[in-house]
Image (cartoon, rainbow, N blue to C red):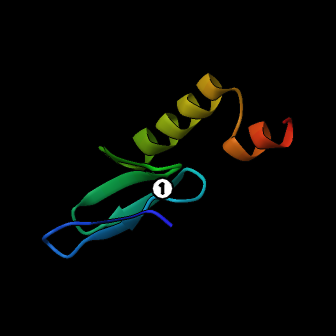
Amino acid sequence: MSNLRFTDGMSFDTSGPLRLAMRPDGAYVIGEGMLVPVRDLAEGRQLIENITKTRGGTREQREDTR
């Protein structure tokens, strides 16, 4: 498990697949070791789609082909 903890008390688990998270200070795409702030949920969905397309599928799909 990969956790990021900030001095304001916010913490994020960046393990697991890419997903959207809403927090009091905004929206984030988290997962696969990443934490990316996004403007809104629509931008977050688009980012996940772009990352997935660029990488050729989800991480789980890529690992299944090994």
Find disc 1 in the rendering and name its residue: 20
Which amino acid is tagged 1?
Leu
- The residue sitting at the left extreme is 7
Q: Is residue 56 left or right of residue 6?
A: right
User: Looking at the picture, how far across and down is residue 8, in whole percent?
Assistant: 13, 72
- The residue sitting at the right extreme is 65
Which of the pair 18/59 is nearer the observer? 59
Residue at point 37%, 66% (across, down): 12
User: Looking at the picture, how far across and down is residue 24, in whole percent?
Assistant: 25, 69
Q: Is residue 39 left or right of residue 19?
A: left
Residue at point 45%, 62% (across, down): 2
Q: Is residue 34 left or right of residue 27?
A: right
In the displayed structure, 8 sits above or below 60; it is: below
In the displayed structure, 23 sits above or below 28; it is: below
Residue at point 84%, 36% (across, down): 66
Q: Label 1: few (<14), some or many (≥20) within 10 Å?
A: many
In the displayed structure, 17 sits above or below 3; it is: above
